[in-house]
Amino acid sequence: MWVQDFGSSVPCCCNLVAIPCFVIFTFCDLYFVICDFHRFVFRSSFISTLMLGLALTGTLHSATGGKRGTAGAQELLVPVGGRATALGGSAAADVAGAEALFWNPAGIVRTARPFEALFFHQTHLYDIANIAAGATVSFGEAGTVGLLVRSLQVGAIPVTTVDRPYGTGDTYTPSFVTYGIAYGRRFTDMISLGVTVKLVTERVLEASAVGLAFDAGLQYRTGVEGLEIGFVIQNIGDDMRFDGESLNEPNTLYPNRTVIAPFPLPTTIQIGATYDLRFDDAGRLRLMGKVQSNSFDTDQYIAALEYSFADRLFLRGSADLHGDVRRDAFGADMFTYPYAAGAGVRLTPADGIEASFDYAFRYSRTFTGSHSFGLTVAL
């Protein structure tokens, strides 16, 4: 079980269950308001959306008493997508197409083509890798449907026992696979909503855990030219627990079984914004920022930049200005991933086909950092 521990308090489940319901009802209310009034109300709704996000961020923080407890299923937090990884995950407001399946389901409607697919590979320490794929299909005004799958691969691990602590000669391979289906719809030319349902599966030897996680997101194009707002809540769901034959203890006088405590999902609430600065017809600088409140860790404040030339070549960089900084016994910052950078290129290899290749490097204070490669194809 992959569990990250940052404190003794466990998030209040009642608050975390109430939050998505509140978000859904508020999104619906926001939609009807937008449909009934003129452009002035659009601007008022933007302010209301921002205030709502700030209120929900404070709700999640107060639900944990200002502290952070434990959370499992940490593979859900590993970034997916070359562009989003280079931007430190700050693309909640403008992420689009198949990449939006992993960040904000409201963005899956933002595709120029009816079909889009994403293939992603990220290398970590030694033989650890994060592999993901996703696809979206647009049905016009009826909305967009997307499918995703992601797998954290950790390689083969030697089997050890009390009698043979250096290995029995056998190996086992843990499995961390998540499947998901998403639906998004553009309700007006300025606002889109989306939801995702994910099946989270973990398996170690003959013990496994299965859970359901939900995402809900909103993207809003404000009345201010170049300014967009995004809001998303991710990984809402019941606790997971490992169970299976591997928890039985053989060769004991009396039957014995290890009981594994349940663990919560790593819930996050994110508010992001982007603003475009155009220097000429070809050059564009996109300023991006995100505030992320975590149920399992301190808050994060991310700033990012993306420069594009003719919407064909891209340079990206980001910095994670983590909240309450934790330091080790030597005074060093314990936050692992403070910076990321990358580049991308968009091509049109044939009529009706667009392809994008994105690379990102995510710096790590602890290990050697990770390299990410993403390929997006739109038909």
Image: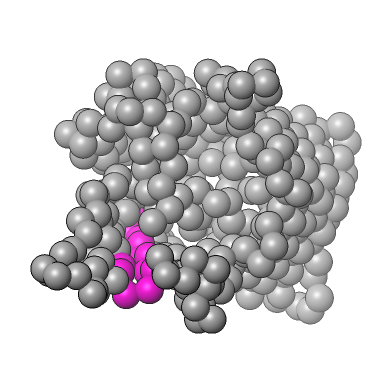
Image position of 362 (left or right of 212): right
Q: Is residue 31 magenta?
A: no
Return the x and y of residue 315 as percentages of the image width and height. Answer: 82, 45
Principal SS element in the magenta part? strand
Name the residue: 54% across, 81% down: 169
Residue 43 vertical placement versus 343 (above, below)? above
Choose between 321 and 28: the one closer to the eye: 321
Q: Quadrant of residue 145?
A: bottom left
Residue 323 vertical placement versus 29 (above, below)? above
Name the residue: 86% across, 40% down: 283
Q: Is residue 197 magenta?
A: yes
Residue 266 vertical placement versus 37 (above, below)? below
- For residue 194, say whether it is visible: no
Name the residue: 63% across, 37% down: 336
Return the x and y of residue 266 as percentages of the image width and height. Answer: 39, 43
Q: Quadrant of residue 379?
A: bottom right
Image position of 230 (left or right of 65): right
Choose between 336 and 379: the one closer to the eye: 336
Magenta segment boundaries in residue numbering: 195-208
Which quadrant would the N terminus be assigned to in this image?
bottom left
Residue farthest to the left, as pictured: 254
Q: Quadrant of residue 117?
A: bottom right
Name the residue: 27% across, 24% down: 63
